[in-house]
Image (tube, grey):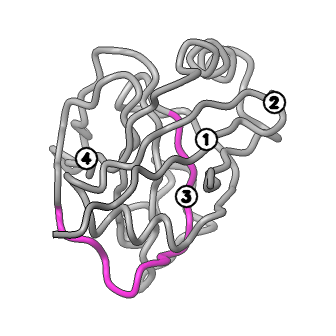
Amino acid sequence: MECMADRYIEVSLVKRQVHCTAKLLDDRAPITCAAVWDALPLANDVYHAKYARNEIYALFPAFAVSEPPLENPTVTPIPGDLCYFAFSGTELGTQAYGYDREHRPGTTVVDLALFYERNNLLLNGDVGWVPGIVWGQVVEGLDAMADACNDLWRAGALGESLSFRRLE
């Protein structure tokens, strides 16, 4: 059996010039890891979670040939978890989320998220449980990233981007 070398990415808050390093969990979420890896680099506006607590995320158009199955799922992400969510445009295209001008029916939106602190629960009052795929784990720089995420929560996300890129 072929042994795959560990793969790593850099996750950054671009404007704040803060980054951390994450290891892809190829052994637990191989299909999701392959889809994300093949799509990198990715960057877009960052948002701070409204429901899940200690989460930042960016939204992207679907980039996988087909959406990954729910592998390595969680509804209780821990600090340093990178999660993948896929939503239909109708799930996000309401005023409650603030994306109603950007996401339309018939589209798929991918949410790549970083959880930076404890006590997260993926329970949405509108739809119930929202399991995510844990596809990566931060292995370096989480403390500095958590400080920047807290600043993002307090000072605002306007003008900030969340970036994911390969480390090779």
Considering the image in quadrants, where does the C terminus appear? bottom right
Q: Is residue 67 magenta?
A: yes
Which numbered disc, 3 or 2, marks the residue closer to the eye? 2
In the visual, does 36 lie left or right of 70? right
The tag on residue 59 is 3
- Secondary structure that dominates the magenta span: loop
**Which residue has dot 1 on it?**
11
Give, as a three-letter code, the residue at label 1.
Answer: Val
**Which residue has dot 2 on it?**
17
- The answer to the question of whether label 1 and label 3 lie on touching residues, with beta carbons closer than 8 A, is no
Label 1: element kind: strand
Mark 3 vs 2, N-terminal side: 2
Mark 4 vs 1, N-terminal side: 1
| Rendered residue at 64%/61% (across/down) | 42
Mark 4 vs 2, N-terminal side: 2
**In the depicted structure, whether residue 91 falls above or below residue 79:** below
Which numbered disc, 1 or 3, marks the residue closer to the eye? 1
Residue 158 in the image: state x and y as whole percent. 78, 37
**Which residue has dot 4 on it?**
126
* Distance from Cα at disc 1 to Cα at disc 3: 14 Å
* Distance from Cα at disc 4 to Cα at disc 1: 29 Å
Give, as a three-letter code, the residue at label 4.
Answer: Asp
| Residue range of the region highlighted in magenta in the rendering | 56-70
Which numbered disc, 4 or 2, marks the residue closer to the eye? 2
Considering the image in quadrants, where does the N terminus appear? bottom left
Give, as a three-letter code, the residue at label 2.
Answer: Gln
In the visual, does 72 lie left or right of 23? left
* Distance from Cα at disc 2 to Cα at disc 1: 11 Å
Which numbered disc, 4 or 3, marks the residue closer to the eye? 3
